[in-house]
Image (cartoon, rainbow, N blue to C red):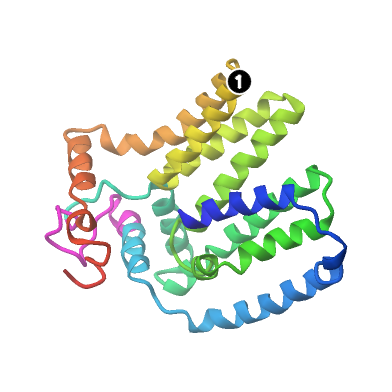
């Protein structure tokens, strides 16, 4: 996802760059706080005018059907690879999370959108902890947060019922806990990093990139023993994705739905155009 990639790129750049004298005034702590708050005001004011994305309707139906029927299907889109009968290729953790929100607040796209905001706050928390542990000035955290906050795709997805922001949190948590392990060598951080990577996979199949990134990090550093707790935690959390696929021919139907996804053969706007 673009949002996750941007987060890591921004962090990497800001850790290498230092603000020189000509920019001290513009990038002072107070100036950055003022810019952040000002931009935050306009962002908050925009929430009331957000449109409902097509994906939000479909993903919301995933959660609603899971809550009411115990499995996922999309009745609003019949005749697409049996989606209206049973959907296997869905974002497990995200679906469960949405079902919990609907169970608490009822069927409301507004509450589903609002439910993403605490995840956004959690991302900023991990970002703050990351910079604090590096003993960097607070203005670097504010600048990093501002760069991420003002990115167009983040502005959109921060108030959208999609898994993007949750994936950002899991990716940031993976980075944070791996860095904590590198500095302290405490196994508990490996377990937390593995859990974050596994939860990323459980949230979205793209989260498999987090699992691989953690493995490569430890392999490159030749910390072979560290692979055991990291992989164990990731497998336990991420393995929940496959429980639904064990009975009968569920796994085969899952593979069929993945390989016959409408946008693969008909383009990205297939569902949005009603094709």
Q: Which residue is mark 1?
A: 226
In the drawing, does residue 202 fall left or right of residue 68?
A: right
Residue 44 image-quadrant placement: bottom right
Nearest the viewer among 210 and 231 is: 210
Measuring 81% from the left and 58% from the top, which residue is drawn there?
A: 19
Name which residue lies at 67% across and 28% down.
Answer: 188
Give 71 or 181, whichever is nearer the viewer: 181
Count of numbered labels shown in the rendering = 1
Q: Which residues are magenta?
A: 65-84
Q: Residue at x 47, y 68 (%)?
A: 160
User: Within the magenta stretch, is there residue 160?
Assistant: no
Is residue 53 visible from the viewing direction of this image?
yes
User: x, y percentage for residue 115?
Assistant: 52, 64
Residue 241 x, y percent position in the rendering? 37, 38
Q: Residue furthest toward the left?
A: 79
Instruction: Kindly give the residue lying farthest to the top in the view shown.
Output: 225
- The foreground one among 68 and 233 is 233
Residue 28 visible in this rendered orientation of the protein = no
């Amino acid at each position: 996802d673009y949002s996750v990639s941007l987060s890591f790129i921004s962090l990497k750049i800001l850790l290498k760059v230092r603000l020189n004298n000509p920019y001290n005034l513009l990038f002072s702590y107070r100036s950055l706080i003022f810019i952040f708050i000002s931009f935050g005001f306009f962002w908050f004011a925009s929430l009331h005018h957000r449109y409902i994305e097509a994906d939000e309707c479909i993903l919301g139906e995933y959660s609603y059907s899971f809550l009411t029927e115990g499995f996922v299907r999309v009745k609003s889109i019949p005749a697409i690879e049996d989606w209206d009968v049973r959907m296997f290729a869905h974002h497990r953790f995200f679906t469960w999370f949405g079902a919990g929100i609907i169970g608490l607040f009822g069927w409301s796209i507004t509450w589903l959108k609002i439910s993403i905001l605490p995840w956004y706050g959690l991302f900023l928390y991990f970002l703050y902890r990351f910079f604090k542990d590096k003993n960097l000035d607070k203005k670097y955290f504010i600048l990093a947060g501002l760069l991420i906050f003002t990115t167009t795709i983040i502005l959109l997805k921060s108030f959208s019922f999609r898994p993007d922001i949750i994936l950002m949190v899991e990716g940031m948590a993976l980075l944070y806990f791996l860095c904590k392990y590198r500095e302290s060598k405490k196994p508990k951080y490996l377990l937390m990093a593995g859990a974050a990577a596994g939860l990323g996979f459980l949230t979205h199949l793209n989260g498999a990139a987090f699992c691989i990134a953690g493995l490569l990090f430890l392999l490159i550093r030749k910390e072979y023993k560290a692979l055991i707790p990291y992989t164990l935690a990731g497998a336990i959390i991420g393995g929940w994705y496959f429980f639904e696929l064990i009975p009968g021919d569920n796994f085969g139907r899952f593979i069929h739905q993945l390989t016959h996804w409408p946008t693969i053969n008909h383009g990205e706007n297939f569902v949005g155009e009603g094709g």
